[in-house]
Image (spheres, grey):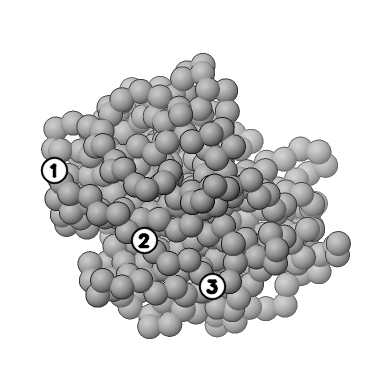
Amino acid sequence: MGDKQAAAFAGSSRSRGRAEHGKARLRRVGALSVAGVVAVAGTAVALAGTAVAGTNGRGTTTIDNYLSSVATIPHTAQAFAVGQVSELSGRTGSSSDLIEHWKNGKWVTMKPPASAQLQSVLTGVWAASAKDVWAVGSSGPDAQVLHWTGAAWSAVGIAGLPANVELAAVSGTSSANVWAVGSAFSGNTIDPLELHFNGSKWSVLHEGGSNISLQSVAATSAKQAFALGSNSRGGSVALRFNGSAWKTIPLPKASSTYFLNALSARGGEAWFVGSEATGTKQVPVPFALLRKGSAWHVMKPPKPKHGTFPVLVSVLDLGNVVWASGTMTTNGGRSIAAFTEKFVNGKWAVGHFPPAHSGTTVSALGGDSIRNLWAVGSFPLGKICASSYSPVSFHFTGAWRKFTMPGGKVAGGALLAAPKVPTC
């Protein structure tokens, strides 16, 4: 994979975690980079951050609000979503943690712990119960781990955690088996970082190789978990925890180059999704791998009929149904849109999130049943060339229903009139 292809594919990852390859660091969410650019096979689309619009009433201007992860509480009607709020005050930019709680049929913004850092972001959330929720991300140059106990969020210090690290994702199977993964930076090198919580304390590991940045994790039992990342050459790397240590698992060969963005595991199987480069122009199309036991199966999700450069950025294995979400360019490459892929009974079906809205991105899926599925991301509050971005969610209970978040107004699931923003 060439440098341009690696950069383009890396820009489509679901996580806002950094990936440092040599001297380069990328921030990711859906198909958005931190600079607000969709980079897919050499096609760039200007998005959030290219212009500023809409004030938040405190003399500062909101430029980019998004959600990067969502988790449901099993057997309840509750969910937690996390992300980031970015603001501009004069020429000074800052970002802070965004935490949303779905309860009693509406989203409520929660108060995160105070941070002394100018830049703070949450990239992963996992819930054992309504009173036991973990969120991870970064605050300034260091990782942050937050815990919800039912009354308040608190920052958790971890002994032995080095400086200049960040966490990208968290997953668990019980209150006594929680994994978080990310990256540890040192000069021009990067090493995988795995944290494990046994119910009483966190332990710090650096296993699975070197020059690897981890962006996704999925635990299936106390003796098995999977992690996904990328190496210094821009290629995807998969790891598996075998009950005692993390080991690299070789990925299968395919007919063309592919890059993986997200994973989901359940029982004895694990799904990995992303995109593969096809043809002489290396145009990306949706791609998926299924690992059953120790065997790999190359899957071929269909392309959406409308849109170009489609890549898959999130996946959720619900057992008898597998959902994936993706991002593609539309309007001749001038904007982007989100789409869905559903795998059931051995067949794929392409769908979309209603209503079709240019600029909407979905960065993560979460749910505990085929009738309780959430997708989260962001959408523009105006023309794509000059717009603020607001968090957005979609809830599936048999059909998708769109909910804007408190920052973008919620009214019974209906989108209120968006704030006025500059025109292009």
The residue pinned by badge 1 equals 223
What residue appears at the point 59 percent right and 37 percent down from the top-left corner?
4
Mark 3 secondary-structure assignment: loop
Based on the displayed image, in which of its 4 quarters is residue 27 positioned? top right
Sequence order check, earlier mark of 3 and 2? 2
Toward the viewer: 63 or 358? Answer: 358
Task: Give the Cα separation between the discs numbered 1 and 3.
Answer: 42 Å
Q: Amino acid at mark 3?
A: Lys
The residue pinned by badge 2 equals 300
What residue appears at the point 72 percent right and 77 percent down from the top-left corner?
417
Task: Give the Cα separation between the discs numbered 2 and 1.
Answer: 30 Å
Q: Amino acid at mark 1?
A: Lys
Mark 1 secondary-structure assignment: loop
Based on the displayed image, in which of its 4 quarters is residue 242 positioned? top left
Toward the viewer: 220 or 312? Answer: 312
Q: Would you call the spot at circle 2 few (<14 residues within 10 Å), some (14-19), or many (20 or more)?
A: some
The residue pinned by badge 3 equals 305
Q: Position of residue 46 (x, y in %)?
A: 72, 52
What residue appears at the point 48 percent right and 57 percent down from the top-left corner?
285
